[in-house]
Image (cartoon, rainbow, N blue to C red):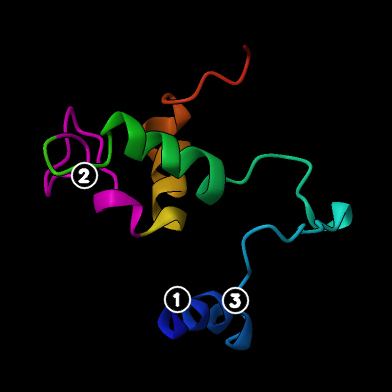
């Protein structure tokens, strides 16, 4: 019985969030526009675009290359926006 109670209070002693506690979010710290590293890179990962079998491969795919599993979001952003004269993005839609 003592072991279970220790498991319940140990996270609180270490400063970790405890289940059941309400977390407050500072609204001013929430970004108003999407961040490439937080919103776009996860989409590339979910769709498999930055995997080794697709654009994350050493040579890329179709001439376009991304960092493997989004390891370098800044370079990925530069490639997406600047390579091929920016033809990879359609900013008019």
Depicted 17 relative to depicted 51: above or below: below
Observer-nearest residue: 46 or 50? 46
Observer-nearest residue: 24 or 14? 14
Q: Which residue is mark 1?
A: 4
Depicted 57 relative to depicted 43: above or below: below
Examine the rendering and report whether any part of residue 82 can be seen: no
Extent of the magenta region: 54-71
Quadrant where the C terminus is found in the figure: top right
Where in the figure is residue 65, as x and y percent of width and height? 25, 42
Where in the figure is residue 76, as x and y percent of width and height? 39, 48
What residue do we see at 58% from left, 80% from top? 9
| Comparing labels 2 and 3, the label whose residue is closer to the camera | 3
Q: Main secondary structure of the magenta part?
A: loop
In the picture, the disc for residue 69 is: none
Compute the Cα span from label 2 to label 3: 35 Å
Q: Which residue is mark 3?
A: 16
Looking at the rendered structure, the secondary structure element under dot 3 is loop
Q: Earlier in the sequence, mark 2 or mark 3?
A: 3
In the picture, the disc for residue 56 is: 2
Q: Earlier in the sequence, mark 3 or mark 1?
A: 1
């Amino acid at each position: 019985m003592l072991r279970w109670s220790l498991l319940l209070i140990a996270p609180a002693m270490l400063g970790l969030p405890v289940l059941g506690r309400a977390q407050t979010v500072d609204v001013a710290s929430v970004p108003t526009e999407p961040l490439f590293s937080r919103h776009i890179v996860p989409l590339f990962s979910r769709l498999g675009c930055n995997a080794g079998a697709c654009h994350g491969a050493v040579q890329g795919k179709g001439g376009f290359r991304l960092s493997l599993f989004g390891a370098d979001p800044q370079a990925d952003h530069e490639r997406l926006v600047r390579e091929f004269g920016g033809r990879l993005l359609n900013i008019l839609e």
